Image (spheres, rainbow, N blue to C red):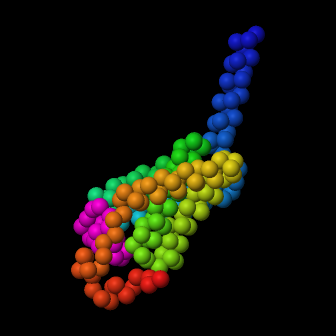
Amino acid sequence: TSTSSINYCLTTYQNTMMASATANNNPLDYPLRLCESVAFILHGILGLCEPFTGCLRSAFQDNGAMPTWFWPLAGSILICVAIINFRGNDVVILMNQAYIAAFHMGGVLYHNSLGHHPASGVGPGMFVFLAFAVACMRAPIWMAFGGLMVCYVFAVGLAKVLVKPKAASDAGRSDESARLLRVD
C-alpha cells in the first residue's frame, strides 16, 4: 500500500505540474510574452547585423563603449530567448524572464553610463516591467520581486565590466552630437 500511495502522489504531482506548465490561467500571459518575443526577434536581427552596419553604435552614440563582440552575441541570445519564451514549462519561462529583466536592466544602466537623457531608459525599462509581470503570473509576487533584485545586482556587475564610456574627444565626436547628451 505504501508503494501505491507513493505512485499516487507522484502521479498527482506530475499531473499538477503538467497542467500548470501547459495552461496558465491568466489571459495576459501569452500576449505579454508574444510582445516580448516579437521585439526580441527584431532587436536580435539588429544585433546580428551590427558588425556590418554600425546602426546600434551610431544610434546610441556609444563611441565604442561596448565591446564589438557584444552586439552579435546579444542578438543571438535575444533570438533564442524569443523562441524559448513559448516553452510550456514554468521554470523555463521564469528563467527566461529573469534573463529578460537582467538584460534590460543592463540596458537602462548602459544608457545612464553613457550620459544619455534619463528618458532613454524607458525603452529597456518597459521590458523589465513586462518580465516582472509575466513572472508574477507564474510565481508568488515575493519570489518574482526577489528574482528581480538578484537580476538587478547581476546587471550592475555586468554593466561595470562591459560598459566603458569614452569621452567625446577620445572618440572624435562632433560638437553637434556632443550637445545631444544630457547636461545635468
Would residue 164 appear left or right of 133 to someone viewing this image? left
In percent of width and height, residue 154 lies at 48, 52
Residue located at (32% from left, 59% from top):
70
* Frontmost residue, 67 versus 73: 67
Most distant residue in the bottom direction: 176
Residue located at (45% from left, 71% from top):
112
* Frontmost residue, 117 versus 18: 117
Would residue 10 appear left or right of 106 to someone viewing this image? right
In the displayed structure, 142 sits above or below 103; it is above
Residue 6 on the magenta segment: no
Task: Let me know if residue 30 appears in the view.
Answer: no
Would residue 104 appear left or right of 13 to someone viewing this image? left
In the displayed structure, 18 sits above or below 147; it is above
Residue 52 on the magenta segment: yes
Residue located at (54% from left, 43% from top):
92
In the displayed structure, 93 sits above or below 163; it is above
- What range of the chain is rendered magenta? 50-68
* Frontmost residue, 9 versus 114: 114
**Rendered-image quadrant of the N terminus:** top right
In percent of width and height, residue 71 lies at 33, 61
